[in-house]
Amino acid sequence: MKITFLVPPTFDKNRPAERSLGYSYMTQPTMNLYELTMAAMLEMDGYSVAYEDFVITNRTHHDLERFLIMDESEIYFIWSVNLSLENDLAATKFIQKYSPESYLVYMGTAPTMYADRFLTNHQQIVVRGEPELTVRDLCRHIAQHETYRDVYGISYLNANEEIRHNPSRELIPDLDNLPFPARNYLKTPDVFYDLRLKKVPYTEMLTSRGSNCHCRHCVPGSLSFAIEIEVESVAKKTNPIFRSTENVEREIEVLAKEGYKSIRFLDDNFITTEKRLLPIAKALKKYGIVWGCQSHLNGITEHVAAILSESGCRYVEVTVESFDDEILKDIRKGLTSAEIQEAINLLNNHHVPVYLNLLFGTSHLETAHTMEDTFKKARKLKVHHVNLMIATPVPGTDFYKKAKENGWILGGDYRPVDMLHQSLVDYPNLSNQEMQRILFWFKLKLALSPRFIYYRIRHWFR
């Protein structure tokens, strides 16, 4: 049985959605490690597996048509997120037209949350939440021509044309049992890069699932978010699940032997404890791999900063919503403004570059004054880069529930917007237009700042 993982081309003039992290439009190519892990798993099970990314290879909907006319896959898998939902539904029409007998299986945050949008005929199936074991079970049933309708974790149309949601599947207790992502399916691996790391060949890694962040607006990576959405219906928020450090070290060793020189860790929070960080950092240093990661600031200690500095860490990307303690308390940040500044200073003291995301508008307490104060304090922190964004109330978060209840969403409900430029929140004391105007002027000030110009020039010649 032939199986194809499909990343459809864009059908409009918008930038393609970034499907791995899932909450922004693409600014640089990102690998979908979730699909590549499933590709490796299904290949081990004996299936003929293909991976067709029409975005990375710059192919159009005409190319998709030609591909579908010639292809003989029995199952197409699409990983869909909120920002790609409409685009993926457009791609569905092509698949239904040219491969009407093939199964079309959707995974990711959008199908988990909006299963009804993806189920219009009996050849379509939604895999909710964590996909691997459900996908393996589903493929076995289809390959053996058995009914798949008792498979846990799926949604489908029953004989009465009604949507049936089967019981949720338990989460994978041991991530070490999963194979490493099949990066060999990437036809153009040289297009992936991280300018902050500079060394190539470059790849990405995931060492955990789930987020220990309790901020009401938090939207983790698209797999973690899909798990949260699915689990929320049957249980409370899950704790992160980690691969063992030994398993992570083995993948680093494999990647080093394959020639990779730089790695970006896509974990929602890579730095959790010194005990976990140290063996991973030693492995990266042993093989001369430079690397970067995302982290919550509550994991940064003097010793952690030293480990990062000594092991080739080229950046830590952090998100700060405000330097106003009332706002931080309202969003359940778990840190004070003083603690945030102290953690960033520790990284600076150990010469670990900090890439700071400032995320405005997470609280109804936000005002033009708090935005200005946060921006001024951020500029004084001597970070290497500041990225400015406006929070979006995404369905599945407490932020969305509160914003919808209080009428703070422009137009009344969620719709996809570019958080780098647009505001969907419209507070009584701070309109979306004013927030967008302030953001524009902040970006202009950064672009003309001598210190940030200096940092950018120094980065290129480092």
Image: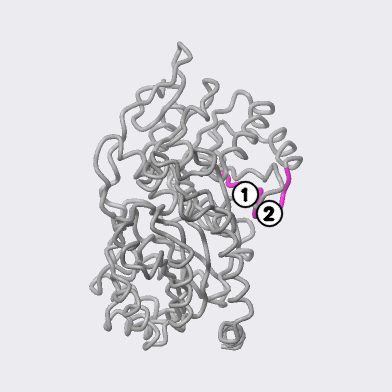
State whether residue 48 is above or below residue 145.
below
Q: Quadrant of residue 62?
A: top right
Residue carrying label 2: 57
User: Seen in the image, is 302 located left or right of residue 113?
Assistant: left
Residue 404 seen: yes
- Indicate the secondary structure of the residue bearing disc 2: loop
Residue 362 belongs to the span the image colors magenta: no
In which image quadrant can residue 247 be found?
bottom left
The tag on residue 185 is none
Residues in magenta?
50-60
Q: At x 57% / y 44%, what residue is drawn?
A: 84
Secondary structure under badge 1?
strand
Q: Residue at x 58, y 68 (%)?
A: 193
Residues tagged 1 and 2 counted as in contact (Cβ below 8 A): yes
Would you call the spot at circle 2 few (<14 residues within 10 Å), some (14-19), or many (20 or more)? Answer: few
Residue 460 in view (yes/no): no
10 Å crowding of disc 1: few (<14), some (14-19), many (20+): some
In the picture, the disc for residue 53 is 1
How many angstroms separate mark 1 from mark 2 (CA)? 6 Å
Q: Position of residue 434 (x, y in %)?
A: 56, 58
Q: Amino acid at mark 1?
A: Asp
Secondary structure, magenta segment, majority class: loop
Count of number-bearing discs: 2
Vertical arrangement, residue 350 with respect to residue 34, above or below: below
Give the residue drawn at x 47%, y 33%: 114
